[in-house]
Amino acid sequence: MRFSFTLLLFVWLSFTIKAQVLTKEKKDISELYQEAKIQFINFEKLHGHFIQTKNVKMHYLTWGNPENIPLIWSHGSLLNAYELYDVADKLAKAGYYIIAIDYYGHGLTPIPNHEVSLYNIADDIKFLMDKLKISKAVIGGFSRGGYISSAFYDAYPNYVLGLVLADGGSVSSNTHYHQMDTSAIKNQFKYLDDKTSFPWDSTYTSEFDAYKSLYDQTEKGNQFKTLILIKKNKFGKYGIYEGLNNFFYMNSSQNFSDLIYRPTKAPLFAASMVMMEPKIIYRNLKVPVLILDPISKNDPFPFEKENQALQKQHSDLIKHVTYPNIEHNIIYAEPEKFTEDLIDFLKQVKRYNKIN
C-alpha cells in the first residue's frame, strides 16, 4: 500500500512538473511573439517604406546614407526585403545606400490585381528611383531577383551603374531543364503534387499560430523577421505566402513541366522569367557585372560553364566569382564572403563610372 502511494505520488509529481514545463514553454513562445511584434514595428519605423507605383503599393527597406552609391536589391523566391538584413549594415558602412524591395506576393507587397511580369517590377524600381531622385544605381538580386535585375538592365540600361547577379539572371533559367526530357522533369518535381509539403502555402487561425509554425527551435531570439511572411487573408485566416505556388505556376508537376516546355500556357509572371535570354540582354554590355555562382553537386542552377562563357565575352566588365560547395543561397551560407565581394565590386563600379 505504501509502495502504491509512493508510486502514485511519483507519477503525479512527474505529470505536474511536465505540465509546468509545457506551460513555461508555451509562455516563452508567447513572450517571444510579443517581443517580435514590438521589434518588427520598431524596425519598420526606422527602415521600412511604401511607395504606390502604377502596379502596386510596394514595400521596401533602406539602410545607410542616401548620399552613397545606391544598391537596389531584389530578393529570391519565397524570401523578402529582409534577405540582406544580416549584411546590410556592413554594406552601408562600406559606402552603399541599400534599398531592398519586396516584389509581388512577398513581404508586405501584395500581388497586383492585373497581369504582371518581371518587367513590371523593373518599372516599379524605375518609378522608385525617380521618386527618390536617383539617376543611377547598382542593380542586384538573388535567384529570381537576379532575373529582375537583368530585366531592369534590358529596359533601363542608362540607369545602371553596375549589376550584381547572385545565382540568377546571367543564364537562361531553362538551360539545365532543357537537357532533360519531360518525364524526368515530372519525376524530379513530383513533390509539387503533394499539397501538404508546402508550409508556406498554409493558413492558421491566428498570427501567433503562424508565428509558432515558423519559429526555428534551433535558433535563438524572437526571430521577428518571420512576421513579414505572415498575411491575413480575406477569410480572416493567416497565411504564409498563400497562393504563391499558383503565381509561380508551380502548383503541380504538370504545370511546372508546362512552364519549362510550353511557357505561353503559364501566367505572365512565371513565363517572363523562363522566357528571358540573358545572352540577348547582355550582347552589348556597357556596365560592370558581378556574377556570384554557387557550385555544388545539387546545384539547382548548374550554370558555371555558361557564366564562364559570358565572362569571356565581356572580360573587361564581368567578374565571375564561384562559391564552392554551396547549393544556392550564398547570402545565408557565406554572408562574410558575399559582403566582401560586394564591397570589392563597389570599388570597380566607382572606377568605371569615375566616381570619387
Image: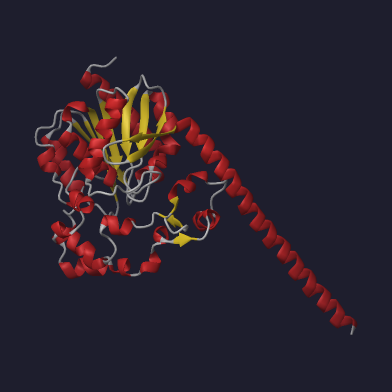
Along the line of sight, the residue nearer the viewer: 289 or 130:
130
- Where is residue 108? Give x, y as percent: 40, 44
Looking at the rendered image, the quarter that the C terminus falls into is top left
Along the line of sight, the residue nearer the viewer: 39 or 238:
238
- Which residue is at the far top? 356
Q: Quadrant of residue 124?
A: top left
- Which residue is at the far bottom? 1
Relative to 305, is 205 on the left or the right?
A: right
| Residue at x-position 23% and y-position 36% | 123
| Residue at x-position 27% and y-position 29% | 138
Relative to 188, is 87 on the left or the right?
A: right
- Where is residue 215? Give x, y as percent: 52, 54
211 above or below 15?
Answer: above
47 above or below 35?
Answer: above
Badge count: 0
Along the line of sight, the residue nearer the viewer: 346 or 85:
85
| Residue at x-position 18% and y-position 46% | 171
Q: Is residue 321 visible?
A: no
130 above or below 261?
Answer: above
- Which residue is at the far right? 2
